[in-house]
Amino acid sequence: MEVTLETQVESVNLAEEMCLRVAEAAGFGEDDCYRIGMSVREGVINAFHYGNEERPEKKIYLALDLTPEKMVIHVLDEGKGFDLRGVPDPLAEENLLSTSGRGIFLMRAFMDEFQVIPGRTGGAEIIMSKRLPSPGSAGSNGKSHNVEPKKES
Amino acid sequence: MSLRATYREAAGVTVVDIGGRITLGEGSALLRKTIRELLEEQRTLILLNLADVDYIDSSGIGELVSAYTGVKNRGGNLKLLHLTKKVHDLLQLTKLFTVFEVYSDESTALRSYK
């Protein structure tokens, strides 16, 4: 499935909703659907804000592929492209109070595979995937982010 | 679901009850507007009750951080109350638990401002 999205805030919700429908139909459980939906949001936010610089004449291309093993999501913008090595680490002490720069980190954390390549439009193409749940499983086959609650301050 | 935010006074602290999604667009904008209004009214002791916030994206995280630093810069303090599991896990994943004071009980949270 491929769709062309406008460079506007509404495209973020639209992309998330579309991918969630596909993920649910593919058998992903609630936790993985959340992670996939969040990753798609972040990919489209990245294209909207950083790639296309919120310029409405530019487009965002979203593609979803379901293979026998995984769901693959492509998000392509019409920006200048970027090098992942130049993206600051949002967990570094000096970046913790930054008000931006966590989208790439979240996509990497929530998906099984993540890469950025030069896109055919000259912009960046984010490619990320999640392994399909095995039959009979609870549907949550990806990385676990279960964390212990922090003690109350 | 769009964001809702109302506030009330309790023990000298402004408790902001928030519900919905804090995401790019209206959700983040409403949180920003609410905090700005509170600071204009010199309310700098703020407790964000996120009990009904079931979703935050990176834009929403950025807005929470912005609110925190904005309040701190005015000599106040902004703390968080009643995180849902998704929000809790997200703050832990992004190491923001090391920044925010988080409470699961309102009375304890209010006492912490003394």
Image (cartoon, coloured by chain):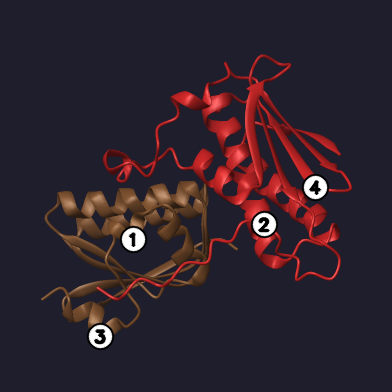
Chain colours: A red, B brown
The residue beneath circle 1 is: B97
Q: Residue at x 34, y 60 (%)?
A: B97
Picture mark count: 4
Q: Are marks 1 and 2 on the same chain?
A: no
Element type at mark 1: helix
Q: Chain under label 1? A: B
Element type at mark 2: loop
The residue beneath circle 4 is: A70
The residue beneath circle 3 is: B107
Q: Amino acid at mark 4?
A: Lys
Q: Chain under label 2? A: A
Q: Report how far apart the C-alphas of labels 4 and 1 lie in the structure.
A: 33 Å
Q: Are marks 1 and 3 on the same chain?
A: yes
Residue B45 in view of the camera: yes
- Crowding at dot 2, Cα within 10 Å, few <14 / some 14-19 / many 20+, comes out as some
Decide: is B105 above or below A30.
Answer: below
Q: Which mark is residue A142?
A: 2
Q: Report how far apart the C-alphas of labels 1 and 2 lie in the structure.
A: 24 Å
Q: Residue at x 25, y 71 (%)?
A: B14
What is the residue that sits farthest to the right in this orientation?
A68
Q: Chain under label 4? A: A
| Relative image position of residue A139 (x, y in whole percent) | 75, 66
Q: Amino acid at mark 1?
A: Phe
